[in-house]
Image (spheres, helix red, strand yellow):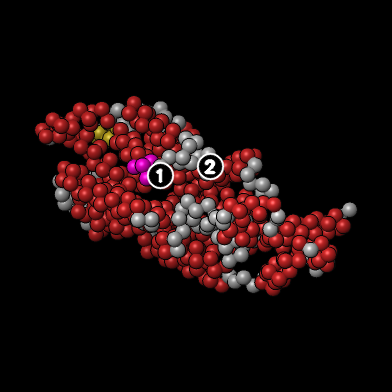
Amino acid sequence: MKYGELQGLRGLAILAVVLYHLWPKVFWNGFLGVDMFFVLSGFLMAETNLKKLTSGFSFTNGINFWYRRIRRIVPLSILVVFATWILVTKKLAIIDYNEITKEAYCAMSFLTNLCAVKETKYYFHENDFQYFKHYWSLAVEIQFYAVVPLFFAVFTRMSTKATLFIMLPILITASLVTQTTLFIAHYPEAGFSLLFSRLWQFGAGIAAFYVRKFGDEIVDDVFLQRYFGGFFKILHNHYVTDVVTVVTALIVLYPKEFEVSYMMIVVTLLAAVAITSVGKEDKVIGEKSKTVQSASGSWVLSVWALRKLGDASFAIYVTHWMVQHCFWVMAVDFDWLNTRLVCFYTIMIIGFGVHHGIEKPLLALRHSKRSFFKTLIAAYVVVAITIYTTKDVDPLTNEFIEKFYHEAAPLVNNKTAWTALATQLNFEKAARLAIYTGHTHCGFYTRSEWSQTRDSSKATDSTRSKKPSITTNLMLFSLSSNTKMMSSNYP
C-alpha cells in the first residue's frame, strides 16, 4: 500500500537530515528529521499489521512481520557497509583500522547506538568522526522491530479505548521520563540513542494509528463523542495537515538553534498530528469499497519532489554519509559553498541511483524465506571475513610515516633541518606524509593534536595562534616538498 502524503512527510524528514549534515551551523535543527522517521515508523508498523487484523496478533504474524522488515532494511544496509569498507580501506586514507573495524561490526549487527553509548560517543560531538555514525537510527529501528510484536500482541487483546487511553500513555510517559532523566543526569548519549529513550516517538506513531481508527468509530461511542467528537472532526482535515507540515518544516529548516529536548517533543507531536490528519477517501473497486490514503488533500505533502524524496529516503540516508566523507577527504576546501552544493547534488544522484538500481530490484526479487535467509547469512559471512582479513599492512604508513612524523617532526621548525629532511622524501612519500599529517591534525579525528588541545586555556590558544604548531609546519613542509617534486618532474 502506498501512502502518498506520508511519503511527502518522509521526504521532508530526509531533506532536513541531509541539509543538517552538510550545513550543521545553518540548519541547526535538521537532525529532528530522524524523530519524524521514528513517528512514521510507529504509525506504519501499526497500520500495516493491525488495520486488517481480525483476531489477536499471533506468533505467526510476528514471524511474517520480522521477515518483511529484515527484507526491507538489512540487505541494502549490509551492502553499504561493505561498499564503505572497501572504499575507505582501499581508496581513502585512514589511521586506525581497529576503530573502523569496530564501527563496521557495530553497523552490521545494528548495535551502533549501543556502541556509541558504551564508548560515550555523543551524536553532537563535532570532532568524533565515525564512518557509520548515521547507522545509530537504523539500529534503533531494528531494535524497535524486535520488540514491537510483543506490544501488538498485548494491544490486540485489549479494547481500542484501553490501548489509546491507558497503555500507550503509560508507555509514552515512561519512555519520555527515562530520556529526560538521562539528559538531566548527564548521560546524553544514552538519552539520545537508546531504544527505550526513543520508544515514546514510536508510541506517538502508534497512537496516531489508533486516533485515526477512533475517527471511524467515534459515532458509536457516546463518551468519546461527547468529549472528543469535535476534536476528531477538526483533526481529520487536510488544512490541518498543511498547517502542521509548514510549521514542522519551519522548525527543522530554521537557521537558528533551538533547545533539543523541547524541539524533540514538539516535532514528534507535530508529526503525529500530521499523520492523523491525512485524508482518507472511499473508492469503489468493482463491488467492493476500499479505503485508500489520498495525496490530493494536502497541497504541501503532495509536492512531487517531496514524494520522490520520500520514495528514495532510505537509499539516500544509508549512502549520504559516505558520500559526504569522500568530499571531506578529497575536496580542496569543503567549507566552500560550491563544494557543499556539489556534494548535496551528488548525494541525491547517488541516493536515487541506489534506490532505482539496487533497492527496488532487491525488493522485487521473489524467493522463499529459507532461500532469503540463506543468502543473507552468506552475505554476512563474506562481509565479516573481508573485514576481519583486511589489515593495515602498508609498510610505508607503519614504518616510514609514523617514524618520520613522531621523531623528525620537531626538526621542522629548524630551517637547517628543513633542507635535510627534504632529501628523505620522494614524490610518493611526500604525498602520503601530507595525507597522514592532515588527517592527524583534522578536527574529526578524536586522537588528533587539534582535538586534544581544542579546549585548552585562552592563553594557550593565543600562543598557538601566533606560532604555528609542529603539525601545521610539517603538513606545509610535506605539501611544499610534494609541490617541488611535481614541478621538477613536470616542468
Q: Is residue 217 visible?
A: yes
Query: Residue 463 appears at what percent x and percent y?
Result: 66, 54
Query: Residue 413 appears at what percent x and percent y?
Result: 76, 61
Q: Earlier in the sequence, mark 1 or mark 2?
A: 2
Q: For the residue carrying disc 1, how many other residues have a C-alpha within 10 Å: few (<14), some (14-19), or many (20+)?
A: few
State whether residue 339 is above or below residue 113. above
Query: Residue 412 appears at what percent x and percent y?
Result: 76, 63
Q: Secondary structure at mark 2?
A: loop
Residue at (43, 40) in percent of width and height: 258
Nearer to the camera, 338 or 447: 447
**Amino acid identity at mark 2:** Lys
Contact between labelled residues 2 and 1, with CB atoms less than 8 Å apart: no
Q: Which residues are magenta?
A: 260-265
Residue at (15, 49) in percent of width and height: 158
Q: Secondary structure at mark 1?
A: helix
Which residue bears the numbered disc 1?
260
Which residue bears the numbered disc 2?
25
Query: Residue 73 appears at what percent x and percent y?
Result: 42, 54
Residue at (22, 46) in percent of width and height: 169
Q: For the residue carrying disc 2, how many other residues have a C-alpha within 10 Å: few (<14), some (14-19), or many (20+)?
A: few
Q: Is residue 401 visible?
A: no
Nearer to the camera, 196 or 239: 196
Along the horizontal axis of the image, is 229 left or right of 318? left
Nearer to the camera, 351 or 19: 19
